Amino acid sequence: MKYLILYLTIFLGSMLFISCSELKEDFNTTVPELALHKDGIVNPTSPNFHGNIIADNNWDMKQCQQCHSANYSGGTAGSSCYDCHTTPGGPEACNTCHGDFANPLRIAPPRATSGAILSSERGVGAHSKHLMDNRIGLVVECTECHTIPNGFSDPIHIDQTAGAELVFGSFTRLITNVSGGFNYQPSLGNFIPNPSFDSNAGTCANTYCHGFFKNGNLDNIVSFTAQSQGSACGTCHGDVATGNPLPKTVAEGGTHPPNQDCGICHTGIIEVTGNTYTILDKNKHVNGKLNIFGSEYIY
């Protein structure tokens, strides 16, 4: 009996050894490389570009964080998003989705979230002219038209409502002809702007910065894609048809003297040559004050 058990033990051991040997010989020890992303994932011109994927997912970056870590430093993927997104905000920096990707100081369109880059396109419009390239007045900050989120994941930042919501700020609502102001006229009452935005037409109305002030064009409606015509002389005060910027005179129900040479009173701010009006100091034009002979007053 013990010989039978010994024989069976030797037999089974031999079979097990042979089986393992065959398994080892047939087993492919080369682990195939797993492709988690399609070709073109980092190519902005490819339909598989990761920016397109994120946009299609309503800008939800949580799926990126699963492999690249919560702070995008590499994670299990071993590939840091900061290799390309070099600003402190990384992929969540403002200029990642709108603005100039190469310049973190230019966070407003162009580029729009839709990819639009032309000022004639709704998502771009006059953003740069207000915020960066304002040649006729003070820079108009983002907060004058938008509520700024506290961070990328702030509920007011990316929601189910398409487009950016407009929430007008204090500068657009500046009240003029106030008691104690320059050349105050009680009979005219206060000029109190009530800013509005027509989403269908893409136009602003009733804002201080576009004419709703004493001696201004109260009924001026400006298109966000009007380009240079939106700020032409005569649009906010004066005659838009002729380009004459003379504000409403006493004869027209205003308080301005009937003198078209702006530089006489607005010294160093406006220069008039023939029918050409040049802004010399944009920081003192459309700044909420009235500058007379070098001094600034509320009005």
Image (spheres, helix red, strand yellow):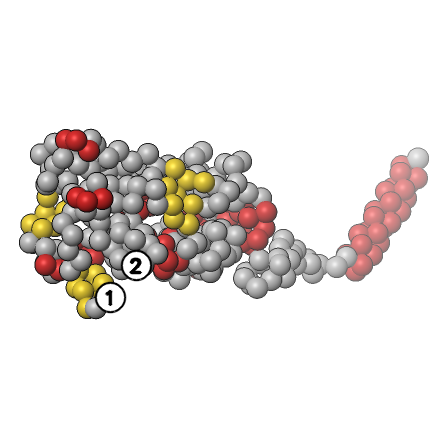
Give residue 215's quadrant in the image. top left
SS under mark 2? loop
Give residue 125's quadrant in the image. bottom left
Amino acid type shown at disc 2: Gly
Residue 171 drawn above or below residue 104: above
Residue at image point 54% right, 62% down: 44
Q: Can the viewer see residue 247 in this picture?
A: yes
- In three-dimensional space, the C-alpha distance between marks 1 and 2, rounded to whole angstroms, equals 9 Å
In the rendered image, which residue does mark 1 sit on? 275
Describe residue 258's horizontal placement relative to residue 30 as left or right. left
Residue 199 drawn above or below residue 18: above
Residue 39, x across and y down, in percent: 63, 61
Residue 62, x across and y down, in percent: 52, 41
Residue 272 drawn above or below residue 139: below
Residue at image point 21% right, 68% down: 274
Question: Which quadrant of the figure contains the C terminus?
Answer: top left
- Is 244 in front, or is 27? 244
Describe residue 186's horizontal placement relative to residue 31 as left or right. left
Q: Residue furthest front?
A: 251
Residue at image point 79% right, 60% down: 25
Mark 1 and 2 residues: CB-CB less than 8 Å, in contact?
Answer: yes
In the rendered image, which residue does mark 2 sit on? 243
Give residue 129's quadrant in the image. bottom left
- Is 216 in front, or is 135? 216
Question: Which quadrant of the figure contains the N terminus?
Answer: top right
Q: Can the viewer see residue 79 in this picture?
A: no
Residue at image point 13% right, 41% down: 298
SS under mark 1? loop
Q: Around disc 1, counting alpha carbons within 10 Å, would you say few (fewer than 14), some (14 to 19), or many (20 or more)?
A: few
Residue 114, x across and y down, in percent: 52, 52
Residue 235, x across and y down, in percent: 32, 52
